[in-house]
Image: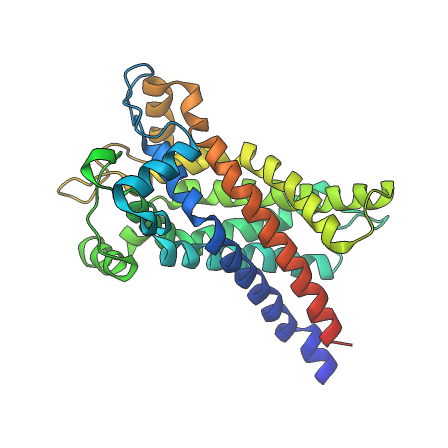
Amino acid sequence: MTSHAKDGVLRDVTDMAMGGTSAMFATLFTNPIEVVKTRLQLQGELVSRGKQAVVYKNVPHGLYTIAKNEGIIALQNGLPAMLGFQFFLNTFRLGVYRMCERRGLTSSRDGRTSVIRGACAAGVGGALGSIAGTPFFLVKTRLQAQASRAIAVGHQHRHTGTFDALAHIYKREGLKGLFRGVGPQIPRGAVGSGSQMVSFAFAKEWLREKGFFESPLALSFMGANLGGVVMTICLNPFDVVATRLSNQPLDANNRGALYRGMSDCFVKMFRAEGVTSFYKGVGANYLRLGPHTVLLLVCWDQLKMFEAYLRK
């Protein structure tokens, strides 16, 4: 009975909790770059290149500008909402992948990670996690976009905090309003998660086989770095669109004043800002995703090993 509980539902719940906990730990260190990334993605919204006002030149300049004008605490804007988003995203994303991994569903017959199976498992988990975390992504985007007038970019919602924003959105727009922007969140979660987890697993296998590293910690660190690069390239276009849809102003009927949905946002961005607009903030995205992926996946690997030790 005890063995069944450990290998069944209880262990699945543990797997999911480890994913969410690891993500929250990583977010404490990477949220300032997320604030800059959000503002870079909103900068020059629907304005053609060359006519955009440049408030934030890059990540270091963005960090300096925000700290100078709003104080260093502003670099942690939207932290509670970001913690909530990362918890829900990775509870499902890493939890589902781990459950499939333990059951051999992500491996081919020779025991190696299967690209298709691994990507499917991570993609499904990422999509489910993104849907669950959409209300918190919506709120964190609006809170991180809020700035003093001198350095403001994008529409300025005026929420006083995470719970105030959630309550305000629900009161004005209902439950549907809390899931504004869920469209791009699904491919964002699926593509980002699939590319990250498969590249992470493959990198560790390759490094282990070539004998470059023996330490599990070193393998996790190097594998996570590669996972962050691949994930950033695949994720960024959907991330920009999700940010734009989440932050846009609303009309009297609570419809988006700038974009009707994901497809409309893609088209309008392409026409007004060009194809490069889909990679706005890509440097900031990697500078966040790189360390975040390393902290997240290294912590996750260590928790898995600790959990396995406790089960002996």
Give x and y (percent) for residue 195: 62, 40
Give x and y (percent) for residue 57: 38, 27
Please give left or right for residue 66 compared with residue 240 in the image. Answer: left
Q: Which residue is at the far left?
A: 252
> Of 193 and 157, which appears nearest the observer?
157
Q: Residue at x 25, y 56 (%)?
A: 165
Q: Residue at x 26, y 38 (%)?
A: 248
Give x and y (percent) for residue 169: 23, 54
Residue 212: quarter of image? top right
The number of numbered badges drawn on the structure is 0
Q: Which residue is at the far top?
A: 50
Give x and y (percent) for residue 125: 56, 53
**Residue 239 vertical position relative to residue 132 in the rendered view, above or below:** above
Residue 15 in sight here: yes
Please give left or right for residue 88 compared with residue 139 in the image. Answer: right
On-image quarter of the C terminus: bottom right
Please give left or right for residue 62 compared with residue 8 in the image. Answer: left
Please give left or right for residue 50 compared with residue 184 in the image. Answer: left
Q: Which residue is at the far front?
A: 68
Q: Residue at x 74, y 42 (%)?
A: 202
